[in-house]
Structure formats: structure tokens, C-alpha cells
Image (cartoon, rainbow, N blue to C red):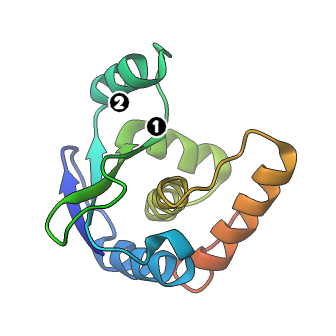
Amino acid sequence: MTLTIHKDVPGTIPSVRLRRLFTAVVGGEKRSKQLGRVNLIFTSPRAIRSLNATWRGKDKLTDVLSFTINDAPSRHEVFGEVYICGKVAKAQAKEYGGTLDSEYLRLACHGFLHLFGHDHHRASESRRMRMREVRYLKGITEVYY
């Protein structure tokens, strides 16, 4: 499985650490043992709000969205996409007292885990997902929650 990063927002992103994180998540998740590509897209508030309205029926801004595109892709096909809103990430980094890079990594990890079948509709799922996030982020960035 490979990661392709697309940046439609100003500023820098921690590309090397994002790739290390992706490798860690892929190595640790059962569902990730397949072929295909994951697109990680850093995008604008307008674009992510539009995606949220179109695909989730929620006409509001959000920080991260994940979409599984093809459950059984070939090597060159897209397995899934994760969208991160740069502006929301920046505001959350300030609110949580972390860096923008750390927030980008936290959101990417969260999105990757959604692609590989994790969710947080119930408290038990939320705890399990949070523990996985902490495990994968440890050593790559500071974990501040």
C-alpha cells in the first residue's frame, strides 16, 4: 500500500513524518494488508464542507474526512482518501496547545484508522480508536490528548 500526498493549502506539511505514520498504521492494521494507494489531501474549508455535505449530509465544516473508494484495489488503484482541512487543523492546534504539524499527524492517523475499519460511534469504540492513535503517534509526534 502506498501513500500519495496532495496539498491544496498554503504552508508546509510534515511529509516525512506523515509517510512514517502511514507505514506504521499499515503495518499494524489487519485490513491494510492489501494493494492500492491512499490519497492524503490537505484542502480548504470550502472543499471539505462541500464533501461533508455531499457524502455525509452534514453541511458544516469538519477537520478530517475519510472515504474508502475500492475495497479490493490493484496495485495502482485508489483504496481510499483522507481529506484534512488546513484551516481547521490550525485552529485546533492552537486550541489544544499543540503544533500544526502534530495536529496534521493526529488527523491523518485518525483518517487512516477510519479507512482500515475503525470508528467511534460508541464510547468503547472511541476509547479503542484513541488508544490506537496514541500507539501509532508515539515516537512520531507529541501526543497531547
Q: Residue 25, image x and y in percent?
A: 50, 75
**21 and 54: which one is in front?**
54
Q: What is the count of numbered marks? A: 2
Amino acid on which disc 1 is placed? Val
Looking at the rendered structure, which numbered label has been put on residue 76? none
Task: Please tell me whether residue 88 is drawn above or below residue 136 in the rendered image.
Answer: above
Quarter of the rendering containing residue 32: bottom left
Looking at the rendered structure, which numbered label has been put on residue 48? 2
Amino acid on which disc 2 is placed? Ile
Q: Residue at x 75, y 68 (%)?
A: 131
Residue at the disc numbered 1: 88
- Whether pointer 2 and pointer 1 mark residues with C-beta atoms closer than 8 Å, the reply is yes
Q: Secondary structure at mark 2?
A: helix
The answer to whether residue 101 is visible is yes
Q: Residue at x 64, y 55 (%)?
A: 97
Q: Residue at x 45, y 45 (%)?
A: 90
Q: Residue 113, image x and y in percent?
A: 55, 60
Separation of marks 2 and 1 at Cα, in angstroms: 10 Å
Task: Please tell me whether residue 6 is drawn above or below residue 33 in the rendered image.
Answer: above
Mark 2, residues whose alpha carbon is within 10 Å: few (<14), some, or many (≥20)? Answer: many
- Horizontal side, residue 28 vs residue 124: left or right: left
Mark found first going from the N terminus, 2 or 1: 2
The answer to whether residue 145 is visible is no
- Horizontal side, residue 38 vs residue 133: left or right: left
Q: Secondary structure at mark 1?
A: helix
Quarter of the rendering containing residue 117: bottom right
Q: Quadrant of the C terminus?
A: bottom right
Q: Quadrant of the N terminus?
A: bottom left
